[in-house]
């Protein structure tokens, strides 16, 4: 596909695209992915819905997009998303504005979330689901003027997501807002309608999840981001966050300035803690996530300095049980308490020894 048009942020032209080639107009606002490599098609592919999700296939069928590749799917909604202000305006659509392409509602939420058969009666309509990435069945819903991301999950997955949210807030860390809604869990759009731009970490590091590499990249951006990254992976180590990948953490940037503001709030923890059942390694000995976290602290003196400066409250059983009380899902609280405390003990014992 030969792309011709303009890459936009709201109504500001960031770059011109001629036969797929990028001519940068506004370097400050350019997406980080395109700063790292000028692959416009790759950037568009990253914004398309995961074709392997069952309900994604149903959605594409209803919208008559079954034979569309990822680039074409993203372009069907001008590559617009809920969580940033970037979009693509083709050469034939010079009169289009951001108000024309930004999402106002979503009639395909039930189809995307649980495969609602009544949605097959709808005709084509622009939907944010075409750029709603990730492997879990999910949907965007607008409630009282705010977008919420709804996601399927088992009781243990929903408990784990909620508990990590509550524990992180108790410790003073930046956490995405989560709530239970019947049998689903929902998270409020932390960009607040793209008042800031979220860009996933893969824009900076590709698919490389290595803690040391990521820390070095973030530390070059700003001390603040690096500190927040240490807090993020501390929570992953503490709560056995197995599925931290470079699309579920990232950077918030100023829409007008392109300035790096902070790491995005901690989100997407439904494959952690008890989500896959009760781990056998309750003592947390030889825990690989803890070992990886401690390796970072050992090899990067600034990382251990940042960790010690987090100044979060001491974790004890009352904090853990208080978080449990806020979640109406029954679990083995004694196991959870020991699991968390043992993990924290493994971390702190090594740090004290240094």
Image (spheres, grey):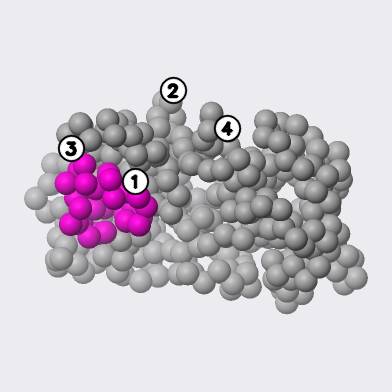
Who's the residue at 86% across and 43% down the image?
317
In the rendered image, the quadrant that contains the C terminus is bottom right
- 335 inside magenta stretch: no
In the rendered structure, the answer to whether residue 116 lies left or right of residue 160 reads left
The furthest residue to the left: 92
Question: Which residue is under mark 2?
Answer: 144
**Where is residue 15 shown, x and y percent of the image?**
26, 59
- Are dots 3 and 1 in contact, CB under 8 Å? no
Q: In the rendered image, is residue 269 in sight?
A: no
Q: Quadrant of residue 334?
A: top right
The magenta segment: 48-76
Q: Earlier in the sequence, mark 3 or mark 1?
A: 1
The Cα atoms of the two marked residues, 3 and 2, are separated by: 24 Å
How many residues crowd mark 4 within 10 Å: few (<14), some (14–19), many (20+)?
A: some
Numbered label attached to residue 180: 4
- Helix, strand or loop at mark 2: loop
Q: Earlier in the sequence, mark 3 or mark 2?
A: 3
- Helix, strand or loop at mark 3: loop
**Where is residue 141 shown, x and y percent of the image?**
40, 32
Q: In the rendered image, is residue 22 in sight?
A: yes
The Cα atoms of the two marked residues, 1 and 2, are separated by: 26 Å
Numbered label attached to residue 124: 3
**Where is residue 202 shown, x and y percent of the image?**
46, 64
In the rendered structure, the answer to whether residue 48 lies left or right of residue 121 reads right
Question: Which residue is under mark 1?
Answer: 55
Q: Earlier in the sequence, mark 1 or mark 4?
A: 1
The Cα atoms of the two marked residues, 3 and 4, are separated by: 31 Å
């Amino acid at each position: 596909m030969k792309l011709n048009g303009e890459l936009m942020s709201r109504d500001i032209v960031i770059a011109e695209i001629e036969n797929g080639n990028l001519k940068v107009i506004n370097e400050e606002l350019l997406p980080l992915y395109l700063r790292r490599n000028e692959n416009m098609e790759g950037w568009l592919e990253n914004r398309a819905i995961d074709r392997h999700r069952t309900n994604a296939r149903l959605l594409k069928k209803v919208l008559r997009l079954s034979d569309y590749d990822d680039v074409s799917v993203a372009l069907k909604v001008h590559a617009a998303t809920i969580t940033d202000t970037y979009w693509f305006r083709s050469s034939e659509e010079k009169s289009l504005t951001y108000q024309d392409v930004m999402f106002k509602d979503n009639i395909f939420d039930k189809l995307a979330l649980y495969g609602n058969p009544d949605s097959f009666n709808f005709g084509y309509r622009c939907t944010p689901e075409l750029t709603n990435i990730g492997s879990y069945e999910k949907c965007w819903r607008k409630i009282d003027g705010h977008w919420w991301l709804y996601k399927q999950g088992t009781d243990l997955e929903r408990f784990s997501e909620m508990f990590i949210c509550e524990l992180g807030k108790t410790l003073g860390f930046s956490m995405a807002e989560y709530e239970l809604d019947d049998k689903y869990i929902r998270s409020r759009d932390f960009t607040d309608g793209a008042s800031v731009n979220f860009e996933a970490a893969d824009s900076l590091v590709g698919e490389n999840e290595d803690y040391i590499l990521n820390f070095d990249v973030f530390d070059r951006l700003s001390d603040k981001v690096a500190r927040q990254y240490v807090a993020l992976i501390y929570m992953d180590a503490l709560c056995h966050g197995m599925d931290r990948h470079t699309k579920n953490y990232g950077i918030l940037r100023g829409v007008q300035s392109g300035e790096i503001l902070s790491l995005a709030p901690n989100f997407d923890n439904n494959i952690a803690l008890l989500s896959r059942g009760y781990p056998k390694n309750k003592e947390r000995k030889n825990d690989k996530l803890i070992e990886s976290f401690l390796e970072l602290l050992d090899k990067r003196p600034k990382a251990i300095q940042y960790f010690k400066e987090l100044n979060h409250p001491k974790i004890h059983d009352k904090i853990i049980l208080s978080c449990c009380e806020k979640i109406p899902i029954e679990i083995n609280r004694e196991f959870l308490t020991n699991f968390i405390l043992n993990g924290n003990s493994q971390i702190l014992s090594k740090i004290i020894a240094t």
